Image: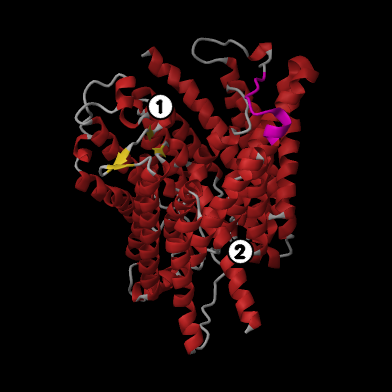
Amino acid sequence: MEGFLNQLPIGLSIGAVLLLIALGLTFTFGQMGVINMAHGEFIMAGAYTAYLLQGWTGRAAVLVALPVAFVVAGALGLILERLAIRHFYGRPLDTLLLTWGVSLVLQQLARDLFGAPNVQVQAPEWLQGGPGIMPYSRMFILALAIGSVVAVWAYLNRTGQGRRMQAVMQNRRLAATSGIDTGRVDMRTFFIGSGLAGVAGVALTLIGPVGPALGTYYIVDAFLVVVAGGLGQLRGAVIAAAALGLLNSFAEFWTDASLAKVIVFVAIVGFLQFRPQGLFVLKSRALT
Amino acid sequence: MTLTTERPVAKTPPATWRTRLQGPAVFATVAVLALVVAPLLLEPFRLGLLAKYLVYAIVALGIGLAWGQGGMLVLGQGVFFGLGGYAMGMHLKLVEAQGDLPDFMVWSGVEQLPALWEPFANPVFALAMVVLAPMALATALGALVFRQRVRGAYFAILTQALAAAFVILLIGQQGLTGGTNGLTNFFELFGQDLALDETQRVLYIVVAVVLGLLYLGARQLVNSRFGRLLVAVRDGEDRVRFLGYNPATVKTVTFAISAGMAGLAGALFVPVVGIISPALLGVVPSLELVVAVAVGGRFALAGAVLGAVVMGYAKTTFSEQFAGGWLYLQGALFILVMTLAPRGIAGLLRRRRKETR
């Protein structure tokens, strides 16, 4: 029974990380139809930011690393969007392959800069230990994800920028006709989405080591969250991420690690039989 | 969400006797080069490498069919390649063990032959499974997914997740699959010594002939009514549905055919290269082949084949000289191709031919 309960915090914190990653993906995918395979490398960039900062900032390392990683990953995303992706709008499958090329380059860059072996980020003392089965570090990740969701929700619904973003997501042409500068909105979406991946990277340093291929372990699962949750849907992403994280860790507990992924995959294909467009669907009259 | 803005326009040039003979002439030249000149000129090591590229070209042909013609971006062909490869590998292992347990099972402490392995001792069963297992999996997945109108990027992501899960499963089931090492140490195929140059040369010819036949078959398919329907599904799935066809069936059949090709390629890969392991099948190798098809030109079947051979050659050459540099080069090449020439080499050639005419 104890082993069973142990899976709960693991599943929830993995779900929280997946959520942070999927938030960015679901909005870039939903709004621009871009499948960003380089998103995983923004996670990696965030994690290495935390690694570089830990020597300088002492006890508050994680707290400093979060905003810095957000900006670093966000800036990378912005550069990618401006230089390459904006030429590919409306061709989702091509962006997938293009950004995969970018991700190859970024991974190799990290390997040359930081070396191929994994590095370890020391969690600050106040995050070590914790009551019973729930270590402070995992509580922190959970709080971070909840905080980010609230922030994104508030941005989307309580600011003018956020409302414009929703407008572009629902109908790009109509939004443009109404005087919204869709190019600027796209840039902001990309910045915020990529920044959240950087935050996820910092969170991952609390769970395990950091390596050049860090992003590749999470990107596929994060995309599954987007597929299951529905495009551009905050609620969908939250529920799907939690479900996927928990399903994954419990499946690993009940069977073994190698079968867990297969079970998750079968579960998703099964789920799509009932909800082919994910949990929540953006209502639209477009025929696609 | 608008899905495809870019639609290759099918402008058939007027069929003069010259244009009509051009295709067969090129095909015949390539066939002579591949079947007669290459085995005579290349040393055994290089010929083996060429055989490997041609094996990958078979997978690429399937990708070209599914993605280029059918618009289904398949990011998990490694799974089907693996199913074919493991079916072949299991058979070879069992023949070699001659009733005993295969070597790796002894090492990982398995005492009795798993029930899954038993039928693979029969060569007919093994060879049938090479094609049937991938096709069955693809049919099941395709039927479930396409019926619900899951398509485009969603489908691509699902196939990628399948590849990820498949590799983890293979690595985890050490006693059944040989884990990370996969299946290796093959010595003979149907009684022939695999180490002999002569066997490898015959294998090369077999690979080349299989590729040629599959290419002709795929061409025939594309030019048939079914092929027209497939392209129509790619360009306007809803319109095809309104006309009374079922796009799900068309897509499932095509996906299954491309999976069967990948399975066959996997089976040929095993005797040619001498190993089948999870590292050859995961997300990255599957994507690399899609990249190769994109570089060669996805809208032309010949482009897919060409891309696989060119990229295979480039990979060997460049990673021999500077290991890390290859990844930069591959990434950069890919970004360039997608930006400047989304139709790949075949598209560039076709454009030039039009200009010079």
Q: Is residue A193 above or below residue A250?
A: below
Residue A168 seen: yes
Q: Amino acid at mark 1?
A: Ala
Image mark 1: chain = A
The residue stretch that appears in magenta: A110-121
Q: Position of residue B297 (x, y in %)?
A: 55, 64
- Whole-Å distance between the Cαs marked 2 and 1? 39 Å
Looking at this rendering, what residue extends furthest in the right direction?
A: A56
Q: Is residue A41 above or below residue B245?
A: above
Frontmost residue, B238 versus A176: B238
Residue assigned mark 1 = A257
Q: Is residue B38 above or below residue A4?
A: below
Q: Position of residue A113 (x, y in %)?
A: 73, 32
Q: Residue at x 48, y 71 (%)?
A: B29
Q: Is residue B181 above or below residue B37?
A: above
Secondary structure under the numbered disc 1 in the rendered image: helix
Magenta residue check for A112: yes
Determine the image quadrant of residue B231: bottom left
Q: Residue at x 45, y 35 (%)?
A: A244
Image mark 2: chain = B
Q: Position of residue A254 (x, y in %)?
A: 34, 24
Q: Amino acid at mark 2?
A: Pro
Q: Quadrant of the N terminus of chain A?
A: top left
Determine the image quadrant of residue A253: top left
Q: Position of residue B272 (x, y in %)?
A: 40, 46
Residue A36 seen: no
Magenta residue check for B39: no
Frontmost residue, B65 versus A131: B65
Residue assigned mark 2 = B342
Left or right: residue A229 versus residue B249 is right
Q: Residue at x 35, y 65 (%)?
A: B250
